[in-house]
Amino acid sequence: MSMKRISLRAGLVLGLGMALLPAAGTSILAPAAVAQSAPASAVSAPVQTLYAALDKAQNSSASFAERSQIVGAAVDQAYDLDAVLKASIGLRYQSLAAEDKQKLLSAFRDFTIARYVSSFKPGSGARFTVKPAIENSPVGDNKIVNTYIGSDDSMPGTPVSYIMHNDASGWRITDVLLGESRISQAAAQRSDFSSTLTSGGVPGLINVLERKVKTFSKD
């Protein structure tokens, strides 16, 4: 296995914020039936938008801040970050004050964007493949878009799937699943965020996210 492939694999794990093995409480979704109703192009459009931005960023010589603007616009369009944050915090989210939720959402957005920009640096050489078939999720009316992220010497690459839901803004991402086992990003983050919230409350979690952004931006 080449060093480039190892580097890309590590970047995926770190960039998507997942462990290689499920933590306690991590949900793993089994493959679902291929969806027959919603147009595949509409469901997968947010993922295509995200990948186009990541590809543009990794092929850019712009600064971290400028690449963050490229990726940030795609994240805002592709993700329901409020839903992702809610799932990443769990039941405790309901008891948070509205002001705390808004502050957390802002910090979580910056963290999400910086993590992507750091993972797909200029010259990363990531190759993005979106499978045309859309799956029905076992949860509600959600759908699953299956993709691979690889490199020239490791195609098709690491399986990365996206849980999509449809609201007034259209189809958007609410979770990311890594590998054949489909390890949930939201569940992995919930394990990390819970201990921080217990020890430091909302200010503590915001501080952790802000420190991670600073670390990601040192490229």
Image (spheres, rainbow, N blue to C red):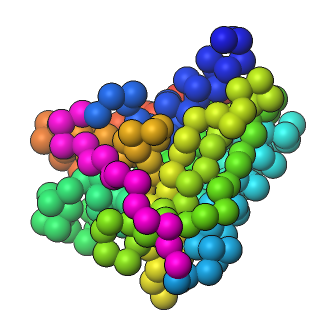
Q: Is residue 139 visible?
A: yes
Q: Residue at x 47, y 38 (%)?
A: 179
Residue 125: quarter of image: top right
From the viewer's perspective, is 11 left or right of 108?
right
Name the image quarter holding residue 65.
top right
| Residue at point 62%, 80% (across, down) | 39
Give residue 171's position: percent from left, percent from top.
53, 76
Report the front residue among 50 and 194.
Answer: 50
Secondary structure that dominates the magenta span: loop
Residue 82's image quarter? bottom left
Residue 45 in the image, given as x and y percentages of width and height: 66, 70
Classify residue 131 as left or right of residue 196: right
Q: Residue at x 85, y 41 (%)?
A: 60
Q: How many marks?
A: 0
| 43 sits to left or right of 3 | left
Q: Position of residue 170 (x, y in %)?
A: 54, 81
In the current view of this chain or complex, which residue is farthest to the bottom? Answer: 168
102 versus 63 height, above or below: below
Residue 138: x %, y % from top left: 32, 66
Residue at 85%, 40% (x, y): give it. Answer: 59
Q: Is residue 53 above or below residue 18?
A: below
Up the image or down, 150 lies above or below 97; here it is: above
Q: Magenta span has 129?
A: no
Q: Quick one: quadrant of the C terminus?
A: top right
Residue 115 visible here: no
Closest to the observer: 63 or 122?
A: 122
| Residue segment shown in magenta | 23-36
Q: Quadrant of the N terminus?
A: top right
Check if residue 26 falls in the magenta segment: yes
Of the pair 32 and 66, the residue shown nearer to us? 32
